Image (cartoon, rainbow, N blue to C red):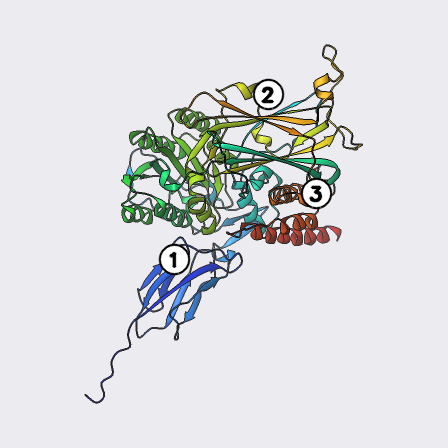
């Protein structure tokens, strides 16, 4: 034995899981590094990590966008689980203006690795040239009113699986601000959450569930709850994908809550790809270009390297980017597959084809080729919500707003099939109310999804699309024929040439409504019809399902945020009671997050009311 010689300490492997300290959700993409070295790794889609600790180091650093960085000293442990605290201030330096927030920074940078196809002079986005104005844009919403069933027996609308409104509203409330009323689309808030409806059992890809009970915010009224469940197709059985990532890299996309978050989100999606899937990447700023040609899902490292090389800078030639992306998708078209462009942007197009009408016509033309469109919104201060919602609608796709990496995980990992794989297109509903049972009714939300009654049987009329495993929920507030409600109704004069008395069928049945649903196969042009009759059998208020109570809680919350003229006795206390008693399994923590969000809004409302009293 040689005196004075000591065996060096062995390297140590540390494993663990990183979660959000508030919601408890696993955090993917967290940077885990050994302090003072270049050794590092990131957490996988389940929030797990494994890292080798050198013998002369004992501090691990955990950092991620929107969270407070945490340093942990390693002692004898080989397993370290970490809870990161959300910290919205780390997203950016913001200045509150009006109802939004804006990032204050200089626009620099360039588009990296782009083979430019069309040229255009570079310029700074107008929003950043003058960062003193909030330019967020939302379509005006005129709430659905009560309609008299005897003179307006039919209600027709397209389904909506978009969920952007909820995550956008959440962003406002987390920043201590009330959202603009027109940012609150109640149907999107309801449909942000999944519900436990039965899977379809026959050849049709959708099941229909209904339930009726007293209305919590107006005891003289009833609520009709309608639930649609799309057939869940196992990932291994899904058709091959031909995807084009269309990424806005203009100056307005600079920052951790924009391009950095886009990269992190798309990396999660890349990890879900199979060898039979293909991905191309197209970017646009002052011009549009191809960063990555169609590449199989087996080459994940190549796709991720292309994403990591992107930088932001320049103006926004959105129209040119959309055209190029569709051309790439067409070149790699899979006849029996899933062909889709995934657009990630703040929607602020200002070069080339930029008007809403032009872009919508372009998207409508391209959807006829069998290529669908998913739109992902990012950023704050100049978010063009109205434009992105319309583009997704016209492109047979869906629209989501991504404010955190957890939202990216929800869209790309938890709901992978529903987000990217359509099982039924042009899905629309038509309800015929029986005036012997219903005095009046109103559809809660879906204002921008209304269709003419004649559109229901018109197979040329576009409507919403349903993805694998998606659920869709709709609520009708009903004034029973026997009710003595003081609710003012929208009335018309008595009709001169129509029958005013009820026919025998209406008067001698307990049927409340006949519900019809039309849908097309993803590659079909002719719709199929489903039908369900809903009777006057009323559910016991104490035995309503979690589906009913939670969806009603979300709807009531939306009405409070909108200060709806129909909110009657709605209250935050009622919302919380309903939601807390209908959490169900809540494996991902979305419902407890909602409950905490309601509490935040309640505090904000109380604070605002007190200021108003002064």
What residue did someone put label 3 on? 541
What residue did someone put label 2 on? 453
What residue did someone put label 1 on? 43
- Regarding mark 1 in the picture, which secondary structure is present there? loop
Measured as percent of width and height from the top left, residue 140 is found at 60, 33
Specify whether 118 is left or right of 172.
left
Measured as percent of width and height from the top left, residue 96 is found at 56, 51
Specify whether 460 is left or right of 216.
left
Q: Single out the mark in the foreground, 2 or 3.
A: 3
Q: Residues within 10 Å of mark 2 (few under 14, many from 20)?
A: some
Specify whether 424 is left or right of 516.
left
Which of 49/95 is in front?
A: 49
Q: Residues within 10 Å of mark 3 (few under 14, many from 20)?
A: few
Residue at horizontal 70 percent and vertical 53 percent from the top? 606
**Residue 389 shows in the view:** yes
Q: CA distance from mark 1 to mark 2?
A: 51 Å
- Regarding mark 2 in the picture, which secondary structure is present there? helix
């Amino acid at each position: 034995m040689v005196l004075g010689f000591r065996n060096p300490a062995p390297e140590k492997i540390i494993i663990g899981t990183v979660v959000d300290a508030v919601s408890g959700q696993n955090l993917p993409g967290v940077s885990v590094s050994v302090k003072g070295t270049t050794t590092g790794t990131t957490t996988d889609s389940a929030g797990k990590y494994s890292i080798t600790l050198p013998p002369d180091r004992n501090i691990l650093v955990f950092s991620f966008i929107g969270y407070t960085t945490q340093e942990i000293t390693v002692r004898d442990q080989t397993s370290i689980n970490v809870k990161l605290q959300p910290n919205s201030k780390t997203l950016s330096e913001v200045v509150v203006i009006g109802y939004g927030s804006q990032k204050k920074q200089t626009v620099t940078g360039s588009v990296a690795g782009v083979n430019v196809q069309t040229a255009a002079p570079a310029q700074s986005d107008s929003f950043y040239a003058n960062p003193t104005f909030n330019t967020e844009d939302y379509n005006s919403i005129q709430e659905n009113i009560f309609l008299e069933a005897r003179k307006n027996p039919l209600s027709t609308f397209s389904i909506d699986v978009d969920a952007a409104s909820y995550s956008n509203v959440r962003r406002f409330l987390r920043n201590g601000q009330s959202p603009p009323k027109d940012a609150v689309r109640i149907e999107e808030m309801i449909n942000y959450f999944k519900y436990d409806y039965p899977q379809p059992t026959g050849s049709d890809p959708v099941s229909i569930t209904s339930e009726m009970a007293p209305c919590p915010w107006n005891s003289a009224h009833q609520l009709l709850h309608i639930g649609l469940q799309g057939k869940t197709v196992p990932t291994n059985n899904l058709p091959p994908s031909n995807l084009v990532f269309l990424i806005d890299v203009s100056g307005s996309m600079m920052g951790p809550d924009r391009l950095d978050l886009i990269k992190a989100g798309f990396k999660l999606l890349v990890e879900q790809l199979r060898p039979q899937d293909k991905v191309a990447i197209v970017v646009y700023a002052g011009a549009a270009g191809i960063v990555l040609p169609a590449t199989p899902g087996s080459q994940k490292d190549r796709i991720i390297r292309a994403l990591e090389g992107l930088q932001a800078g320049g103006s926004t030639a959105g129209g040119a980017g959309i055209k190029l992306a569709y051309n790439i998708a067409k070149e790699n078209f899979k006849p029996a597959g899933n062909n889709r462009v995934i657009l990630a942007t703040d929607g602020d197009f200002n070069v080339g084809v930029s008007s809403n009408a032009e872009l919508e016509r372009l998207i409508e033309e391209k959807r006829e080729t069998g290529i669908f469109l998913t739109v992902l919104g990012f950023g704050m201060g100049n978010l063009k919500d109205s434009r992105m919602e319309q583009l997704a609608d016209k492109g047979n796709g869906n629209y989501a707003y991504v404010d955190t990496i957890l939202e990216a995980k929800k869209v790309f990992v938890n709901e992978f099939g529903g987000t990217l794989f359509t099982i039924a297109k042009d899905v629309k509903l038509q309800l015929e109310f029986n005036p012997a049972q219903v005095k009046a009714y109103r559809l809660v939300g879906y204002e921008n999804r209304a269709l003419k009654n004649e559109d229901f049987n018109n197979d040329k009329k576009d409507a919403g699309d349903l993805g694998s495993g998606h659920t869709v929920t709709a609520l009708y507030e009903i004034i029973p024929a026997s009710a003595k409600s003081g609710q003012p109704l929208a009335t018309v004069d008595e009709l001169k040439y129509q029958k005013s008395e009820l026919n025998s069928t209406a008067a001698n049945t307990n049927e409340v409504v006949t519900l019809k649903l039309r849908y097309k196969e993803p590659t079909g042009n002719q719709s199929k019809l489903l039908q369900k009759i809903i009777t006057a059998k009323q559910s016991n208020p104490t035995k309503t399902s979690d589906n009913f109570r939670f969806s009603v809680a979300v709807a009531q919350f939306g009405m409070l945020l909108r200060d709806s003229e129909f909110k009657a006795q709605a209250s935050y206390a009622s919302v919380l009671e309903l939601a807390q008693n209908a959490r169900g399994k809540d494996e991902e923590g979305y419902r407890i997050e909602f409950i905490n969000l309601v509490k935040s809004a309640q505090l904000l409302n109380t604070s605002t009311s007190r200021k108003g009293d002064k």
